[in-house]
Image: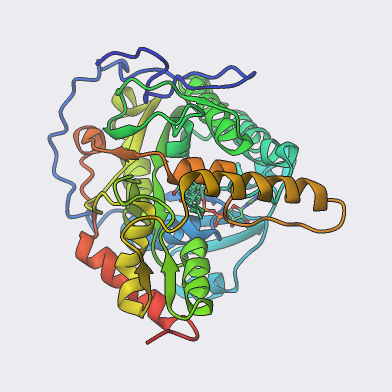
Amino acid sequence: MGQEGGGASGRGRCVGRPAGAPKEDGPSGGQFEYLRTVAAGMADSTEVRELVYLVTGGCGFLGEHVVRMLLQREPRLLELRVFDLHLGAWLEELKTGPVQVTAIQGDVTQAHEVAAAVAGAHVVIHTAGLVDVFGRASPETIYEVNVQGTKNVIEACVQTGTRFLVYTSSMEVVGPNIKGHHFYRGNEDTPYEAVHRHPYPCSKAQAERLVLEANGRKVHGGLPLVTCALRPTGIYGEGHQIMRDFYHQGLRLGGRLFRTIPASVEHGRVYVGNVAWMHVLVARELQQRAALMGGQVYFCYDQSPYKSYEDFNMEFLGPCGLRLVETRPLVPYWLLMLLAALNALLQWLLRPLLLYAPLLNPYTLAVANTAFTVNTDKAQRHFGYEPLFSWEDSRTRTIRWVQAMEGSAR
Ligand SMILES: NC(=O)c1ccc[n+]([C@@H]2O[C@H](COP(=O)([O-])OP(=O)(O)OC[C@H]3O[C@@H](n4cnc5c(N)ncnc54)[C@H](O)[C@@H]3O)[C@@H](O)[C@H]2O)c1
Ligand SMILES: CC(C)CCC[C@@H](C)[C@H]1CC[C@H]2[C@@H]3[C@H](O)C=C4C[C@@H](O)CC[C@]4(C)[C@H]3CC[C@]12C
């Protein structure tokens, strides 16, 4: 497929900042069909424990699932290093198993801390990031963590001889773009004008490009670095903070949520367990099929249905006692835009006094109101990925988690 206009293959750009990424044409030609069956997920249990993995951001929403999934489904794991700015108390319970779990409190913006954590690791899964589309952090801080932090991880791999690096990118490196173009069930090669202005997608796009460009660099010892990037759409599941926020908002509003986005605007969503599973699988298979997978990007996908952001949330919040009022948006779109602009103005005016960071701002409105869904099988073709959790499982697990939250509406 063509790569015109930047394309979902990653040749996006930020306004005023260059970006880019290779297309699906690795040394093996990109036509390779994956033949070995890995669908069951578990590698041979007789395998020797010899590998050291490092997960940056291992205590975040996704990171915790990656850590737990590695412990369950990577039998070659000897040591798992969990690196995060804020360590979770739950790590303690993992320390009694057969794998040595090493908790490292550290900051990805500090090159020496990253190098110390990376030294001796076979594989790095770099999922740490500052996920902020609400204006909580300054653009400088977002770049520092997401771009400089990623540079530090790459340099640490090169200096210490770590050969395999998996980067958690985002659908947002592609879109929705600043023009509000819809991306309707596209794949990694679908042409799309990936132009951004907001610091979060710009920083993710720059970081992704750095990771992909680092593929093939010689690491300490002379062997080549092998990298790839995973691009989740909107992740949901146990631990999802924004779902928690919507749930509590619904409770405050007497068990109701009000539709703001037309039901026809599809938004891509993927279950956290499947995203974690993709990380585990990609990290494992990258070691076997470097020529095919090195320098590649993969959207994260599963069988979650195509729905609007709000209708999708209701799949979980509905069974927990909330209802979505109105079949059409209650507030006209022009008024929402006005409110979003007002919120942005208030944020700016109040900044010296307090942090005002509501969910609605011009950027979040544009993302929610622009269709962005993926339909691809690239991960299946390249490394045999099949979702570990069906849609029914993903839904049930997420509902149980919402129900377990204090003050359930049931
Ligand atoms: N949540 C989503 O819908 C989504 C979608 C696509 C991609 N992503 C990407 O997935 C990754 C994880 O996102 P998440 O939703 O789990 O976010 P999260 O905020 O829950 O997790 C990020 C983790 O990174 C850690 N971190 C932040 N700054 C750090 C620093 N300077 N040094 C070390 N650790 C630091 C945080 O403490 C946190 O534990 C991010 O890279 C994000 O861009 C998330
Ligand atoms: C009209 C508003 C009130 C609706 C508010 C919803 C808004 C907060 C949601 C809608 C879409 C969400 C983003 C989307 O799922 C994908 C990602 C990519 C990921 O890398 C980081 C999170 C992010 C930006 C979601 C943030 C919350 C958004 C904007």
Q: Is residue 66 left or right of residue 285?
A: right
Residue in the foreground of this view, choosing between 252 and 100? 252
Answer with the quarter of the image where residue 272 lies. Answer: bottom left
- Tell me: residue 64, above or below residue 377: below
**The C terminus is located in which quarter?**
bottom left
Q: Residue at x 57, y 61 (%)?
A: 102
Q: Is residue 14 left or right of residue 321?
A: right
**Relative image position of residue 109 (x, y in whole percent):** 71, 41
Q: Residue at x 34, y 66 (%)?
A: 314
- Tell me: residue 108, above or below residue 225: below
**Relative image position of residue 137 (x, y in whole percent):** 71, 48
- Tell me: residue 45, above or below residue 287: below
Q: Residue at x 18, y 47 (%)?
A: 38
Residue in the foreground of this view, choosing between 113 and 323? 323
- Tell me: residue 206, above or below residue 268: above
**Relative image position of residue 128 (x, y in whole percent):** 57, 48
**The N terminus is located in which quarter?**
top left
Q: Residue at x 42, y 74 (%)?
A: 256
